[in-house]
Every structure is written in structure tokens, then in C-alpha cells.
Image (tube, rainbow, N blue to C red):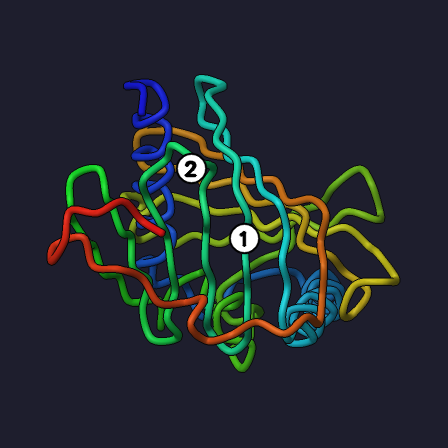
Amino acid sequence: MTILRRHSLLTFRAALAGALVAAVPAAIALPATTAFAQADTLDQVVAALRGITTMKADFVQTDRNGQSLRGELTLKNPGKMRFEYERGVNMLIISTGNSLHIVDYEVNQVERLPFGNSPLGALLDPKRDVKRYGRLIPTSNPNVLSVEVKDPKKPEWGTINLIFTRDASAPGGLELNSWVALDAQNKRTTVRLSNHRYGMTVANSTFTYRDPRTTSRRPG
């Protein structure tokens, strides 16, 4: 893997880790009318996330320098997710249902992160309510919804924005289009999804991995 490609991957790992360990606020003060409107729209976001049983999508991950990596995202509720990178990128990111595992075959390391109190917990655990720790950000397009998640008391954990587009064919009528993670050093990483597919059979073995600390073989 080239130095630039590895830097891009590690930047994303740092941004994702910050987003995943952030404990975000339980309430946000808003004017009453705005609060009701936000609650109604966030209800739609919650329904869309809870409506996903399984999903696959292609992704393009881009760092602030414009370096991009591609791969396939597989999601199975509750709580399972796999980022499978393009050939030549010897890293996997897998949620097993209890925690997130960042598996780096380049240096034979595994990093484990809890997601129980994290922003992406809304995506990884559909029983949780994104309204408790997210807020709606206005957009110029009524068919695009942006949900920001951050903890102002923990700026070192950064910010993540989940972007949804209205799509009648998607669960709940909303499709997760992308997210943008901004870490405490202002390093931005964008993940864009395309070619969404829903409702296929996904084996639980998809969310297992070969531990690089016990063997030096390449990932299968």
C-alpha cells in the first residue's frame, strides 16, 4: 500500500474512532416550534434506520487531501457491519454486534472500540433512538436530511454528520447517502454510498475476521 493511501486510511480510522466513542448530549435546547419539527423529521430517520434488515452498498472514502479508497459496506441489523476495502488495502473494519474491530493486516494489529454510547450506535443498533443524541441541520434541498452528532463537552471526539436522501424504494423512505466525520484536528473524512441493495441474505460469518496477531497470511 502506498504511503498516501495508508495515510488516508489511518485518517479515516481516527475520525471513525472519534465518532464511535463520543458520548453525545441527551437533549438540545431549541425553540418549541423548531423542536417539534425536528422531532417529527428525526422520527422519520429513526424509522428508516430501523427498517433496514440487511444492506449492501459500494462506498468511496475521501480524506481532506482528496485521497480516495473504495470498497463495499455490508450491514445486518442489529449491530453488524463490515467495511471491505478494495484489493491492496490490507485492513477491515467490522462490527460484530457488540463492538467495532479495526483489523490492520499491514501491521498485524486489532483495535476494539465499544459503540454502545456512540453516534453510529443509531446505525448499528436500530433499537436506539437517534433523537436522543442528534440534531437536524437545515439543507437547501427538502429531499436531503442532515443529522449532526457531537458532544460540545468533548470536542476532542469530533463531529459526524449523517446525510439521508428521500427515496421511496428505501426502508422508511430515506436512504443513507453519506456521512462526514470531522476530528478535533479539523481533518475531514467523507464516506459516500452508492448502489444500495436491501433485504438480501447475509451470513453471520460475514462479520468475523482472521486475527492477524495469530498468523501472517493476507486477509481472505
Furthest toward the bottom, the residue is 127
40, 8: nearer the viewer = 8
What element does badge 2 sit on? Answer: strand
| Marking on residue 155 | none
Q: Is residue 194 left or right of residue 220?
A: right
Mark-to-mark CA distance, 1 and 2 = 20 Å
Point out residue 3 in the picture as x, y percentages from the top left corner: 28, 19
Label of residue 182 in the image: 2
Q: Which residue is mark 1?
A: 73
Q: Earlier in the sequence, mark 1 or mark 2?
A: 1
For residue 202, which quarter of the picture?
bottom right
Instruction: Specify few, some or many for label 2: CA neighbours under 10 Å numbering under 14, 14-19, or 20 or more.
Output: many
Q: Residue at x 34, y 63 (%)?
A: 23
Residue projecting furthest to the left:
214
Q: Amino acid at mark 1?
A: Leu
Residue 111 % position (x, y): 20, 55
Question: Disc 1 on helix, strand or loop?
Answer: strand
Q: How would you rate the neighbour count of disc 1 (Cα within 10 Å): few for under 14, some for 14-19, many for 20 or more? A: many
The residue nearer to you, when weighing 97 against 107, is 107
Residue 86 picture location, percent across and down:
47, 37
Q: Callout 2, which amino acid?
A: Leu
Q: Residue at x 59, y 50 (%)?
A: 162
Quadrant the N terminus occupies: top left
Residue at 30% over, 30% down:
185
- Picture residue at 55% right of the left edge, 71% below the top: 76
Task: Report if the CB atoms under discs 1 and 2 are less than 8 Å apart.
Answer: no
Q: Nearer the viewer, residue 130 or 113?
A: 113
